[in-house]
Amino acid sequence: MKRTIQTLVLLMLAAQLPLHAQVIERIDPPSWFTGMKNDALQLMVYGKEIGSYDVKTDYTGVEVKTLVRTENPNYLFVNLNISDDAAPGTVTLTFTSGKKTLTHSYPLLARPAGPARGLNSSDVIYLLMPDRFANGDTANDNVAGMTEQLNRSNPGGRHGGDLKGIISHLDYLNSLGVTGIWLNPFLENNQHHSSYHGYSTTDYYKSDPRYGTNDEFKELVAEAHKRGMKVVMDMIFNHIGSFHWWMKELPSKDWIHQFDKFTRTNYRASTYMDPYASEIDKMLMEKGWFDITMPDLNQSNPLVETYLIQTSLWWIAFSDLDGIRMDTHPYPQPDMMARWAKRVEEEFPGFFIVGEVWYDDPALSSYWALNKVNPDGYRSNLPSLTDLPLCFATHRAFEGKLNPTDALSRLYNLLSQDFLYPEPLRNVIFLDNHDMTRFYTQTGKSLDAYKMGLSFIMTTRGIPQLYYGSEIVMEGDKSRGDGWLREDFPGGWPGDTKSVIAGTGLSEQEKEALEFTKRILNWRKAKEVIHTGKLKHYIPNDGLYVYFRYNCKESVMVIINLNDTESKTVPGGKYAESLEGFTAGKEIISGKEIESLDSFTIAPKTAMIIELK
């Protein structure tokens, strides 16, 4: 009898619980903002049998326009209109189904009035992987409910880096001379293995708790802004992780691309612009899965499109973000991606987006460039793209496999194709990133090659990006596995005997590379002529490549001598058209004065950056 009474009491208490706690499990986006230029907002509501409910609200300025139901009764899509009359507050949404009534309090926040910063060719972006950069909070190394736990001995495991670690290193990054920080994905990635890299999202609205909270990311952005730095968030619209909460029960059958058996993409993004491409090849490119643990989203579904677009708008408004790097940009449905980029620009004019566009040919890369007039009429609306052709050209130029003149001609020939880009200054340029063998390793562990490569990237056209650890010439060989490209940043973990921040335990070569990097990056910060000046280059000859960045106020001469052992005389007369009006100069790294431009010497395996006088 006693047990029966206890059971009845528990049942009575359960019956008194708020019904919304039993039915509505989540609503995405978790909040929204007043003052948006587009009044429309679509809520994804998830909960048992929620699709059978109607919705209304009496909140001033908020109107329920339509409801969209799918074949899954546990989802309901609510289309709202948020007019200019709507004030920040809590919107009460009332859900009714027959005699059943639920209420949900939905936060409507004031849109931040921060200035649109964006990024451009005056910036230098520092790419870092949060798990491998710095551990500022050891308490979140292992989190209940997250499958993978800390294992620093495994190159492909979780190592404990987090958002607080990045915040604690902002002063270092500022002193290094970078003005932008691009984080590899920090959103929840609750996969069973290799979750550290972040490219298998399992929740679009939640920071991975092993990195910290959404508010800690917001704090990171604010602290970066205090130091005059900008933050770029990595996003993935092409695919999700196989343990995304959607995969337990999809909102609709066509939410992802599904086949009778696992079907991989062919990775041939050239099929989009190939006039002879077969339909099967184009289909596999767009709809095939990137990997077996990465279900491919169907962006042709309007509900998927709206969800993804709102995700990016929410993060921009919530965190005061400056930029987005879009992973695998050509892989999702191209027209949807163009609409997304346009919508972001409409809401946040001047906002920076760079799309990862992985080609070795500028004719293919430029297809995605802003304002490119393509034969098929496609316009990407993409403000910037990753310049992989130039990256690969730097590898071939400095890896030591060609004679010096032919090697430098790789740079010259590649840049001579800039007519393919409407605005090549918008391209993000780099020596390496998290997906390839590090430049220092690629070039035979040559400090000279690093210095020449960095000098080139920091003085040619475009927006330079530096991969974390390059400043101390960290090694990384892709043939050993991706984890080896993404080793822990020295000094980012308690107990590290080597620390870049403290300057302890570094070899003489690492110190030299760090000092060189700091000098050139901090010099570049104030050089408008490098940011937006014109570029004129001369055909490489005798192992020398010479080019100029110039505007109406000043001119900078850059010379690269790729010869192994020979110093070379630079004959000023050959470059007379670019030297007219100048008689001397100062080399910015060494501080050496060039008293006469008629003839001077450059050492082997060296780059000189000369401010002309």
Image (tube, rainbow, N blue to C red):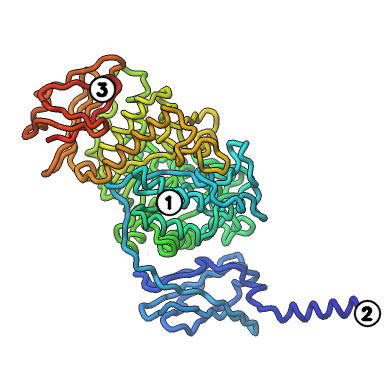
Give the left or right position of residue 219, taking residue 353 as reference.
Answer: right
Question: With 536 as the anchor, is 245 left or right in this view?
Answer: right
Residue that protrudes farthest toward the top in the picture: 565
**Front residue (pair 443, 569):** 569
**Disc 3 target residue:** 561
Q: Position of residue 212 (x, y in %)?
A: 55, 56
Residue holding disc 1: 333
The residue wearing badge 2 is 1
572 lies above or below 50: above
**Closer to the N terminus: mark 2 or mark 1?**
2
- Where residue 407 sits: x, y (%)? 30, 22
Three-letter amino acid code at disc 3? Asn
In this rendering, does residue 398 appear at all? yes
Q: Residue furthest toward the left?
A: 581
Is the C-beta separation of discs 2 and 1 under 8 Å? no
Residue at figure coordinates x 36%, y 78% from the top left: 84
Q: Residues within 10 Å of mark 2 (few under 14, many from 20)?
A: few
